[in-house]
Image: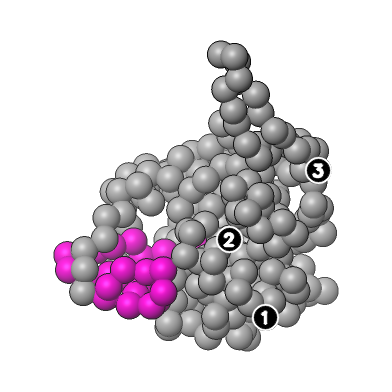
Amino acid sequence: MKLPFYANEYEGEFIIHNTQIIDGQRHEEREWVPVTLNNSDHRGNAVIIGNGDSRSKFPLRLLANHKGGLFASLKVQTYGCNALHRDFTPDFLICQTDEMIEEITQTDYCDNNIVFSSAQAMVKHPGKFHLNSQNYILNAGAGATYIAAYHGHKNIYLIGFDNQQAEGYNNNLYADTNGYGELRSSVGDLKWIANMERLFKAYYETNFHWVHPNPDFCIPEKWKWCSNLFKKTYREFISELDIG
C-alpha cells in the first residue's frame, strides 16, 4: 500500500468477484471500476466526524452547508463514520462493518448520498457504494481520515475521536445499538491508534487537528511525536473555521 496517495493519481482499479483454482492455476473474475467521484472542488478544509462521546458537545447542524470565512474561503467538507447516517448527513460517509453495510442498504441513503466502502460491499450491493481507493480497509474513523487526505485536504479536523480511555466503558455514542458493542464493555483501541498514527506520518504535508472540549483530555502517547498533529478545543475549532 503506497502512502501518501492522492486522488489525482487514481484512475480506478480492478475488483475481484470470484477466485477459482482450475488445473492448479488461479483464475479470477475481475471487473474494472473507474473513478466514480472527482472531489476536486473544495477549499482544503475537512471535518471528520467520529462517534466518541465528546462529539455530543458540538451541534453538527452548524456544519451543514457551512460557508465560513470571506467568500466562503473556510468552507468545509464533512466525512462521517458508519451509524452517523442515523443523525446527520455528511458530504461523505464511510461504511465498513458488515452490520452497518446491511443497515444502510435497507434504506435509500446510498441512493441519495455518497458512501464509500470496500470492493466486497460493492460486489454484494451493486450501485450502492463508491470504492475506497486501493480498497484500503481501516476502521471507519481512520478510513474517513484517509479519504479526506486522499482528496487533498490540507487541514483535517477530527471531532469525536476519543478512543477508549476507560475499562468497562464503550466510548461510542451508538453503543448498545445495532452494529456496536454494549455500553458497559471494554473495547480495544490499539489498532485505531496505530492506523491514525500511520496516516499522520504518511500525509506529513497535511495538518491534522484533534479537537476535544476538555483541554486536559489525554492524547495517545504515540501521536505526540507527530509534528503535524495539533490539539484544539471546540472554541478554537469554531474560531478557526468561522463556524456558527
In x, y percent, where is residue 202?
Answer: 53, 37
Residue receiving disc 2: 94
The quarter of the displayed image where residue 68 is located? bottom right
- What secondary structure is marked by label 3? strand
Q: Which residue is mark 3?
A: 34
Amino acid carrying label 1: it is Ala
Residue nearest the observer in this picture, 100 or 143: 100
User: Pointers 3 and 2 in contact (CB under 8 A)?
Assistant: no
Magenta region: which residues?
Answer: 158-183
- Residue 57: % across, % down: 43, 83
Let me know if residue 68 is in the magenta part: no
Foreground label between 1 and 3: 3
Q: Which residue is mark 1?
A: 64
Q: Which quarter of the rendering shows the N terminus?
A: top right
Count residues near mark 3 (Cα–Cα under 10 Å), then give few for <14, some for 14-19, many for 20+: few
User: Is 40 situated left or right of 152 in this image?
Assistant: right
